[in-house]
């Protein structure tokens, strides 16, 4: 039986659980390209302090060590992945984040992963990946 694993959902859950426990860092396995892109957005927006990819003992498997800042109350992957138009952005901001100035939607576009604030500036839609606040 083939099991499909959502590595991003697992990673965000790990971050949230470690934030709740008050830990200063956590390790996420495996490291994926989308995870590193999401972590980069979280770092740029001060939700995490930093992250670092490293090689594990298992050949070919990389993991990520995340330094937490204690600023995340909630972070989740959005499933199913919803495709939205620019005109629908406000509706989904209201659905997933508490207020306009608090939290981020992470959106996949042809130009890469961006936040809802960047999507507003670029006047573009995309596929909703995750949210954090």
Image: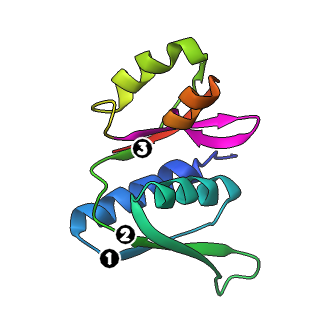
Marks 1 and 3, the one that precedes in the sequence: 1
Q: Main secondary structure of the magenta part?
A: strand
Q: Is-magenta flag for residue 107?
A: yes
Residue located beneath label 2 in the image: 68
Residue located beneath label 1 in the image: 24
Cα gap from disc 1 to disc 3, whole angstroms: 19 Å
Residue occupying the far top of the picture: 87
Q: Nearer the viewer, residue 78 or 132?
A: 132
Which residue sits at x=70%, y=57%? Answer: 33
User: Do the CB atoms of the residues marked 2 and 1 lie less than 8 Å apart?
Assistant: yes
Residue 56 image position (x, y, % from top left):
64, 83
> Would residue 92 be found to the left or right of residue 123 on screen?
left
> Would residue 112 be found to the left or right of residue 107 on screen?
right
Residue 76 image label: 3
Residue 93 image position (x, y, % from top left):
40, 26
Which residue sits at x=28%, y=64%? Answer: 70
Which stretch is magenta?
Answer: 103-116
User: Do the CB atoms of the residues marked 1 and 3 lie less than 8 Å apart?
Assistant: no
């Amino acid at each position: 039986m083939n099991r499909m694993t959502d590595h991003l959902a697992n990673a965000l859950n790990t971050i949230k659980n470690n934030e709740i426990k008050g830990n200063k860092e956590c390790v996420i396995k495996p490291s994926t390209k989308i995870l590193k892109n999401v972590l980069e957005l979280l770092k740029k927006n001060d939700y995490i302090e930093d992250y670092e990819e490293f090689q594990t003992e298992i050949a070919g498997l990389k993991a990520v060590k995340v330094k937490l800042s204690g600023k995340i109350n909630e972070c989740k992957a959005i499933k199913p992945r919803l495709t939205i138009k620019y005109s629908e952005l406000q509706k989904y901001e209201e659905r997933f984040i508490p207020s306009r100035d608090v939290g981020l939607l992470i959106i996949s576009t042809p130009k890469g992963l961006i936040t809802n604030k960047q999507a507003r500036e670029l006047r573009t839609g995309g596929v909703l990946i995750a949210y954090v606040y």
